[in-house]
Image (spheres, rainbow, N blue to C red):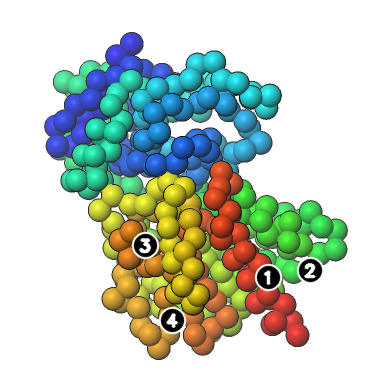
Amino acid sequence: MKRYLVLENGKVFEGEAFGADGEVIAEIVFTTAMTAYLETLTDKSYKGQAVVQTFPLIGNYGIIPEDREGEQSSVSAYIVREVCEAPSNFRCAMTIDQYLKQQGIPGLKGIDSRSLTKILREHGTMNGMICDDPTHADLDKISTYRIKRPVDEVTVRDVRIEEPSDADRRYSVALIDYGVKENIIRSLTKRGCKVTVLPSSVTAAKIRDLSPDGLFLSNGPGDPEDNEEAIATLRELSFDNIPTMGICLGHQLLALAHGFKTSKLKYGHRGANHPVRDLTSGRVYISSQNHGYAVESGSIDKDIADEFFVNCNDFTNEGLIYKNENAFSVQFHPEACGGPKDTDYLFDRFIEMMERRGE
């Protein structure tokens, strides 16, 4: 059956339907990752977005439930060049088509995904509609679509506690869930941390009641400036000097709490091959990224924080070290489950911060 993508500028791509039935309007974004498509599908940072895979063949090792970054798929739709219908992997539980049907996610295959990516790179991220009849697409409705407060939809509803895999527990960590990836939690528990996962609406008073050894700010979807309450909470907690680490949205919210600014990137950074430079050592690392906003380098008050990492491609900010607080944050994903693992050591830096505080 034919299925179409109609962009807000009127450009139409014709392809074939797979996955679930249905029509959806979403922000159209692309990722350059060659593998880890299940991690992409279950990454809550994609809430409200339709993901385009630039790698031409997707689904060759099927769906492996143990590799999920979230219980459910968070993407609005999935767009690929070609789907492998006969995956080969001893851990495979189902095909990607079966998975999308199970999750209620419409898919579009058989389009020129690289041509679509070029449009998004040249003109910037666009909204689009995945539909069965392009004549029904309302361009005004498509162009005015906006992802509204997606963090409220993906955060945990109740407090969740994850015990360390090492029985010799060393530290307790309060993790504010703005859309956390499961491997962030695993990266902490395997280092001996008891992780208390808290809703994004948690108050500073609640966190103080827990008396954690460390505070972790997770990744998540949407415009960081939409999260006024979360920003106010972090501003209040900044006076407590709790060892703090932030990733992605957590990095942006911490920056906003200190008076810095964020802005939307032309087409974002999404993929597993983004080079970042550590300004403290000069060393370059390859990182996994998924974000459409960035902290504006020119807004950073040098009396408050130093830039930690910058992107080697467009020189946008990729990390901050706070001078008079026990805190740092990064824009990329050091826990990247599909790789690369170059910056996994940043979790050890967080552990060392808690160790020093306890001395």
Asked which secondary structure carries label 4, the reply is strand
Q: Are marks 3 and 4 in contact (CB under 8 Å)?
A: no
Q: Earlier in the sequence, mark 3 or mark 1?
A: 3
Q: Residue at x 54, y 83 (%)?
A: 325
Residue 122: x %, y % from top left: 19, 45
Q: Earlier in the sequence, mark 4 or mark 2?
A: 2
Q: Foreground: 52 or 236?
A: 52
Considering only vertical position in the picture, is 166 above or below 28? below
Asked which secondary structure carries label 1, the reply is helix
Residue 236: x %, y % from top left: 50, 79
Residue 201: x %, y % from top left: 51, 61
Identify which amino acid the numbered label 2 is placed on. Arg
Query: What distance separates the C-alpha of mark 3 from that of mark 1?
Result: 27 Å
Q: Is residue 285 left or right of residue 147?
A: right
Q: Residue furthest top?
A: 1
- State the mark number for residue 305: 4
Q: Earlier in the sequence, mark 3 or mark 4?
A: 4
Query: What distance separates the C-alpha of mark 2 from that of mark 1?
Result: 9 Å
Tag 3 residue: 312
Judge depth for marks 3 and 1 and give the one in front. 3
Residue 108: x %, y % from top left: 35, 24
Q: Earlier in the sequence, mark 4 or mark 1?
A: 4
Q: Are marks 2 and 1 in contact (CB under 8 Å)?
A: yes
Q: Earlier in the sequence, mark 2 or mark 3?
A: 2
Tag 2 residue: 170
Tag 1 residue: 351
Considering only vertical position in the picture, is 311 above or below 121? below
Q: Are marks 2 and 3 in contact (CB under 8 Å)?
A: no
Neighbourhood count class around disc 3 (C-alpha, 10 Å): few under 14, some 14–19, many 20 upward? some
